[in-house]
Image (cartoon, grey):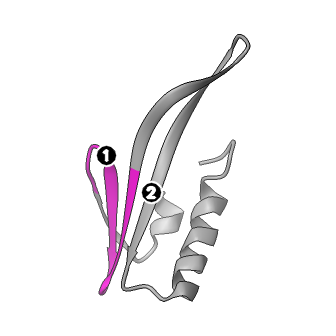
Amino acid sequence: MQPLLDGWTADRFSDRWVLRRSEQCVVISCKVLSPRRIGWLELQQTAIEIIFEAFSKEEEALFLQRFWRYFQRGGG
């Protein structure tokens, strides 16, 4: 997550990250879901929840654009 966190402080907990910069805060929570089975293939699933505090809609969109670029399928 380091390229994404430039200028942010991060606290890691067992089930979430809390990112802070000035008055802004982002909480990223992860929850393991039951695996998806397709025939003999089993795929792990994770639900991600992102909560923004003190962000405009434009700032949220920019953060999410950068977040998904770093954590897209096959990356991050």
The secondary structure type at the circle numbered 2 is: strand
Q: Is residue 65 magenta?
A: no
Residue range corresponding to the magenta coloring:
12-29
Residue occupying the point 58% across, 87% down: 58
Say which residue label 1 marks.
Answer: 15
Q: Residue at x 55, y 25 (%)?
A: 35
Cα distance between the residues tagged 2 and 1: 11 Å
Query: Could you tell me the amino acid type at mark 2?
Result: Glu
Q: For the residue carrying disc 1, how many other residues have a C-alpha within 10 Å: few (<14), some (14-19), or many (20+)?
A: few
Looking at the image, residue 33 sits to the left or right of residue 29; the answer is right
Where residue 44 appears, as percent x and y from the top left, is 56, 29
Of pointers 2 and 1, the one earlier in the residue sequence? 1
Residue 2: x %, y % from top left: 47, 60
Secondary element under disc 1, as helix, strand or loop, is: loop
Q: Nearer the viewer, residue 59 or 40?
A: 40
The answer to which of 18 and 47 lies nearer the viewer is 47
Residue at point 32%, 74% (across, down)? 20
Query: Disc 1 residue type?
Result: Asp
Q: Which mark is residue 49?
A: 2
Residue at the spot x=59%, y=79% of the render? Answer: 62
Q: Position of residue 16 (x, y in %)?
A: 33, 52
Mark 2 residue crowding within 10 angstroms, few (<14) / some (14–19) / many (20+): few
Relative image position of residue 41 (x, y in whole percent):
70, 16
Q: Of the residues tagged 2 and 1, which is closer to the observer?
A: 2
